Image (cartoon, rainbow, N blue to C red):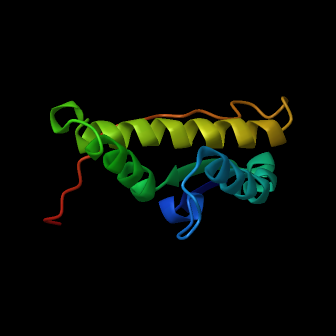
Amino acid sequence: MRIVVALGGNALLRRGEPMTADNQRANVRTAARALAPIAREHELVITHGNGPQVGLLALQGAAGKPDEAYPLDVLGAQTEGGIGYMIEQELGNLLPVEVPDVCTNAVGQWLADIGT
């Protein structure tokens, strides 16, 4: 069975928690522990938010020269890839190598039609 799970960006970097890579990895590890049993038995698709992570990078960029800051779409892609990488690592560490195609990370652009 295919199961889709969405992890919110605030679940990966919690409000009030220092916004560090170590904290994010620890939160991803917690999620991976909960999801690994599902992935052993089913096709698991994980999607995730990235609001706090984009905000952090935007604030870091704003602290420098304005003309050197990256645009939000690029910051979104950077954080999508980084979060996906962490999920891939942590879930992959918990699953046996016999589980085929354990983890794949994809960054993409999506168009939503809000008129329907």
79 or 113: nearer the viewer: 79
Residue 71: x, y in percent?
A: 22, 39
Viewer-proximal residue among 105 and 24: 24
Q: Position of residue 80 (x, y in %)?
A: 45, 42
As drawn, 37 above or below 73: below
> Which residue lies at the image location 51% right of the left edge and 64% below the top edge?
10
**Residue at 44 percent of width and 42 percent of height:** 79
Residue farthest to the front, as pictured: 64
- Residue drawn at x 65%, y 35% is 103
Establish if 37 lies above or below 68. Answer: below
Above or below 22: residue 9: below
Residue 86: percent from the left, percent from the top? 63, 40
Q: Say which quadrant the N terminus sits in.
A: bottom right
Q: Which corner quadrant of the image does residue 51 belong to? A: bottom left
Q: Is residue 71 left or right of residue 36?
A: left
Give above or below for 50 relative to 99. Answer: below
Residue 6 as seen in the image, left or right of residue 3:
left
Left or right side of 109 for 99: right
Q: Pick the quarter of the image with the C terminus.
A: bottom left
Residue lying farthest to the bottom in this orientation:
16
Q: How many marks?
A: 0
Query: Residue 44 at what x, y percent from top left?
Result: 64, 49
Q: Image quadrant of residue 12?
A: bottom right
Q: Residue at x 49, y 59 (%)?
A: 9
